[in-house]
């Protein structure tokens, strides 16, 4: 298995997959802590389905660069879902469910009606579960992912204190002069970018795992926001790297293997938290 892995690393697309996997895991874990604490964990799943629907539209229109539709559409839906208006007639979880199911059904319907592929089932499976898309990245896509990942990390570091305030007490943040609506908008845009990037890694149906599991795992052990955020990033990168390596060496599906690594680490952290008496429910 080790010989197979070393031989695989000689191919550029394998190195591209490892680089992109690490970058996406890092970005998704940073915002994951905020989403879990704001009770918006399921938004990753909803936005990934929106991205799937937008990708279907891009394929029907035969666009060479589907980012022209996928990214703006996902950002718009993220803003609508995370907006702070408390007078909305359809509240958070119901809105996420409606958009998630509607976009997924609409996207699959379009792919069936206007399909030009001889293997529609395989294409849909790859998009939903990330079976092979991470191993077909081009150098240009890797550069795009790297640039967007750096932007996400820089934004998070620069506005860390504001994100912290908005995460824990939005009303108090507004009272102290922080423009909470602006930072909610920024969080929504960043989340949308992460979701679009992560589709190549684990697919539409498994994106929530990258967002939720690292945050929940580290919350079993640590209590401070800073500690949870830092350790969540480290754990997420480790699980993504481990999942990719195992997938390449053993020939298992990439997305499912990464999520399995995240689930395994969650139970390990649960045990460690129980031993230390640091479990938080």
Image (cartoon, helix red, strand yellow):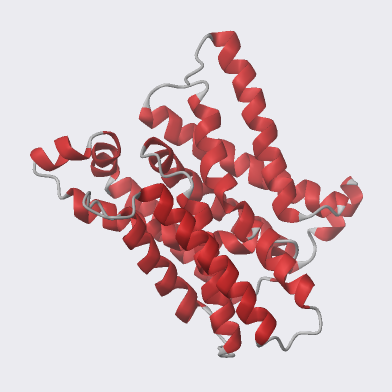
Q: Which residue is drawn at 60% across and 84% down?
A: 59
In screen coordinates, is 26 left or right of 224? right
State which quadrant residue 117 falls in: bottom right
State which quadrant residue 81 falls in: bottom left
Q: Position of residue 167 (x, y in %)?
A: 30, 39
Choose between 116 and 25: the one closer to the eye.
116
User: Can see residue 19?
Assistant: no
Q: Position of residue 281 (x, y in %)?
A: 48, 21
Choose between 72 and 226: the one closer to the eye.
72
Q: Where is residue 166 in the image (x, y as percent from the top left)?
A: 25, 41
Q: Which residue is drawn at 28% across and 34% down?
A: 168
Q: Which residue is drawn at 57% across and 38% down?
A: 213
In screen coordinates, is 269 left or right of 5? left
Q: Which residue is drawn at 38% across and 58% down?
A: 190
Q: Position of residue 219 (x, y in %)?
A: 48, 26
Is 81 above or below relative to 58? above
């Amino acid at each position: 298995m080790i010989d197979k892995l070393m031989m695989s690393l000689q191919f550029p697309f394998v190195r591209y997959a490892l680089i992109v996997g690490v970058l996406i895991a890092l970005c998704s874990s940073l915002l994951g802590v905020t989403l879990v604490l704001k009770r918006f964990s399921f938004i990753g799943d909803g936005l990934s389905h929106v991205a799937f629907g937008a990708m279907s539209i891009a394929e029907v229109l035969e666009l060479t660069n589907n980012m022209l539709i996928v990214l703006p559409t996902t950002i718009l839906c993220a803003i609508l879902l995370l907006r702070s208006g408390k007078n909305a007639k359809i509240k958070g979880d119901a809105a996420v469910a409606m958009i998630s199911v509607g976009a997924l059904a609409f996207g699959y319907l379009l792919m069936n009606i206007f399909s030009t592929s001889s293997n529609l089932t395989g294409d849909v499976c790859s998009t939903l579960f990330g079976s092979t898309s991470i191993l077909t990245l081009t150098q240009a896509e890797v550069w795009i992912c790297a640039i967007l990942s750096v932007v996400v990390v820089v934004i998070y570091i620069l506005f860390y204190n504001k994100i912290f305030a908005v995460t824990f007490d939005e009303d108090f943040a507004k009272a102290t002069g922080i423009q909470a609506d602006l930072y909610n908008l920024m969080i929504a845009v960043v989340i949308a970018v992460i979701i679009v990037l992560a589709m190549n890694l684990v697919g539409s149906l498994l994106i929530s795992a990258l967002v939720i599991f690292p945050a929940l795992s580290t919350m079993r052990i640590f209590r401070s926001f800073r500690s949870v955020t830092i350790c969540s990033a480290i754990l997420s990168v480790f699980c993504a790297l481990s999942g990719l390596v195992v997938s390449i060496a053993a020939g298992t599906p990439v997305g499912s293997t990464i999520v399995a690594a995240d689930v395994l680490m969650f139970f390990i952290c649960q045990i460690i938290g129980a031993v230390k008496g640091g479990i938080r429910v």
